[in-house]
Amino acid sequence: QVQLVESGGGLVQPGGSLRLSCAASGSIFGISAMSWYRQAPGKQRELVAGVSTGGNTNYVDSVKGRFTISRDNAKKMVFLQMNSLKPEDTAVYYCNAHFMMFGKSVNYWGQGTQVTVSS
């Protein structure tokens, strides 16, 4: 059984910072690309940042230079450091684990953590 549990969300003022954490259980962490997605009210879920098993990272343009994704394989955790937060960053943030098994794409999701950026 694989579980992803996010934490670290909350209410922050514009310009502030938050650090999201995602703890993974099970044996798939080492073979999984890990990502953070977000979904704002009335909008589709979008990929925010991803980190491969080898540590390569990618970001959506709107967060480049402000967000940093990282992973700790020993602790089976992935983090999203969010700086210079803007109201448009307000969303539910989801942790995702993705890997291929026997040619099929496998995804696991956390339950989400709310991030609200408001004065």
Image (cartoon, helix red, strand yellow):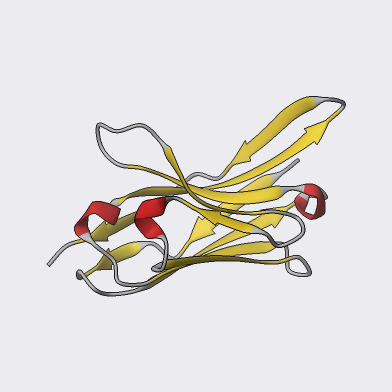
Q: Is residue 111 above or below residue 10?
A: above
**Residue 77 x, y percent position in the rendering:** 66, 63
Q: Residue furthest right?
A: 102
Location of residue 118 by image quarter = bottom left
Q: Residue furthest left?
A: 119
Q: Is residue 62 left or right of residue 21?
A: left
In the rendered image, the quadrant that contains the N terminus is: top right
- At 29% from the left edge and 55% from the top edge, which residue is drawn? 89
Which residue occupies the foreground of this view, 64 or 1?
64
**Residue 31 x, y percent position in the rendering:** 81, 49
- At 68% from the left edge and 40% from the top edge, which residue is drawn? 98
Which residue occupies the foreground of this view, 72 or 22?
72
In the rendered image, the quadrant that contains the C terminus is: bottom left
**Residue 102 x, y percent position in the rendering:** 87, 26
**Residue 80 x, y percent position in the rendering:** 50, 64
Location of residue 58 by image quarter = bottom right
Q: Is residue 18 left or right of residue 24?
A: left
- At 78% from the left edge and 24% from the top edge, which residue is drawn? 104
**Count of marks, rendered view:** 0
- At 20% from the left edge and 69% from the top edge, which residue is drawn? 14
